[in-house]
Amino acid sequence: MALYDKITIIGLGLIGSSIARGIKEKKIAEKLVGFDSNPDYHATINELNLVDELSQDLAASVEDSDLIILATPVGAYASIGETIGSHIKKGATVTDVGSVKSAVFEMLEPHLSPDVHFIPAHPVAGTEQSGPGAGYSSLFHDRWAILTPKEDADPAAVEKLSKFWASLGSDVEIMEPDHHDKVLAITSHVPHLIAYNIVGTARDLEEVTKSEVIKFSAGGFRDFTRIAASNPTMWRDVFLNNKEAVLEMLGRFSEDLTALQRAIRWEDGDALYDMFVKTRRIRKQIIDAGQEENVINFGRRHDD
Amino acid sequence: MALYDKITIIGLGLIGSSIARGIKEKKIAEKLVGFDSNPDYHATINELNLVDELSQDLAASVEDSDLIILATPVGAYASIGETIGSHIKKGATVTDVGSVKSAVFEMLEPHLSPDVHFIPAHPVAGTEQSGPGAGYSSLFHDRWAILTPKEDADPAAVEKLSKFWASLGSDVEIMEPDHHDKVLAITSHVPHLIAYNIVGTARDLEEVTKSEVIKFSAGGFRDFTRIAASNPTMWRDVFLNNKEAVLEMLGRFSEDLTALQRAIRWEDGDALYDMFVKTRRIRKQIIDAGQEENVINFGRRHDD
């Protein structure tokens, strides 16, 4: 028996389409309805047979659904909430996949009836690609899905949504929304911001040409270009909606960078060396925790 | 016929041992001598048969050599130069593989006779691993080797060293030392510094535990841990010996980051979006230039 009778996914980009693939593969829903406001995506969604029904009407798409998943940039939530709020059936679960979690309560709760279960979620998974063609069902395998229900959330609904993520291959963690936003600020948001930033700085240099930046990027720079190629709308919305935690972590990052800069200026080799030794061990711990592959140089090709 | 009769490699870590493998594979030398000051490496060097002779005497190792390659951290160059200077035969070429190029003239030239050809070089290639066991002969394939000879360098010696790097699979570029140091500051040195820094900042947070940093690292952070796992001694020496260019590029990076920080604080979504769109294209250009593999998410496993 399927976990949910009817599931609606709003937004069928990388994450939404990956969830759709997983739902179909694992037969998690009797019926899967999709909606995407971008008409350019519709042909691909239909060709790939990602959903049972691609709805052309956002409000109608959620009617009678047992699980409604918002998988759009978080900046669109309030307007989506306004449109769908009164069409959601009693006892249904509304969730999302956004990378920020405190802000989503303010955006969605005003539009939801008290007899709807609102349980925000964030699968910590993704690639630098976007759109329905970029998804794949194993995107969530061995990755963490973080649920951030309020304290008074219905335990059965939380349990069911946890099962949903487990069915897609994820490990599930329950977390306070504020704590989630701090953890992700340092493990995801600030790393993206500094990747975008270094790529921008390199791009704007006049003394060093763009062709040189590209030619000699194997010295380290190319690593940063991957996450700096991520979806611009999604990331704009993340920074606007996790402002406090991002600014706090960015302040720490800048403080630490200033200390390193000072060590370089004053030629304090011991301070640099001590710092570089400490950070070396973290990668091994990430590999040991199953959150990174145990391959050298990201498995970049070598011929022998 | 081999390109050089006798080659000596001083330092058989990742880079030196990769060169040694390439020399043997392509039969670039009649005789290959190696020296490494780290006795812990000797067993591996011998087991892997990396050189024809593993010398126990630095000065003697360069005698009668036609090409002497320094492949140690650059901080050791001056002392190596002092030891080997008077033992190098007339007409031999001395080169290196260091990531900084202006500073190496001051370190080595005082120790070299005018009838020795000093032609600094930098293969823009590497991995996060260190030591003689980590090397492989294809490390330099399709990567750039930058030579930074002085204007009065002997053209025939430069040509021969270019052929040497081409034999190892590299594309060769001739560059002014100062310009090299600026280009690499932005494409390699500052990226390493900010990777070390974000890993350090994350590691030191009290509100977010280290286990959380590791668990949720797939949000972007894990990418940075790769280059933050690079050889600490080598990188200390890079920063100490390319101080001016690193501080200059770091200044630009911090300025740009402050502007992004301000855009977040003032919720200037358009500024963020415009920036994120511009940086997106760079990765494709790097892939098109053959300096990165055309695989999603660094080719990290997905099962379908």
Image: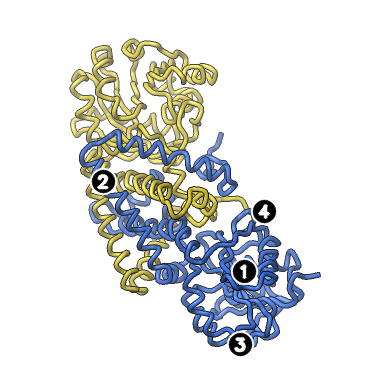
Chain colours: A blue, B yellow
Residues at marks 4 and 2, common chain?
A: no
Residues at marks 3 and 2, common chain?
A: yes
Which quarter of the rendering shows the N terminus of chain B?
top left
Measure the C-alpha gap from mark 3 to mark 1. 20 Å
Vertical comparison of B285 with A67: above or below: above
Q: How many marks?
A: 4
The answer to whether residue A14 is visible is no
Residue furthest toward the bottom? A86
Residue B193 at x, y percent in the picture: 34, 45
Q: How packed is label 3: few (under 14 Cα within 10 Å), some, or many (20 or more)?
A: some
Q: SS class of the residue under badge 3?
A: helix
Residue type, numbered disc 2: Gln
Which quarter of the rendering shows the C terminus of chain B?
bottom right
Dots 1, 2 in contact, CB < 8 A = no
Which of the two discs, 3 and 1, sits closer to the camera?
Answer: 3
Dots 4, 2 in contact, CB < 8 A = no
Judging from the image, mark 4 belongs to the subunit labelled: B
User: Which residue is the site of mark 4?
Assistant: B303
User: Which residue is the site of mark 3?
Assistant: A59
Residue A125 at x, y percent in the picture: 56, 59
Dots 3, 2 in contact, CB < 8 A = no
Residue B60 horizontal side relative to residue A181, left or right: left
Residues at marks 1 and 4, common chain?
A: no
Please tell me which residue lies in front, A173 or B297: A173
User: Which residue is the site of mark 1?
Assistant: A17
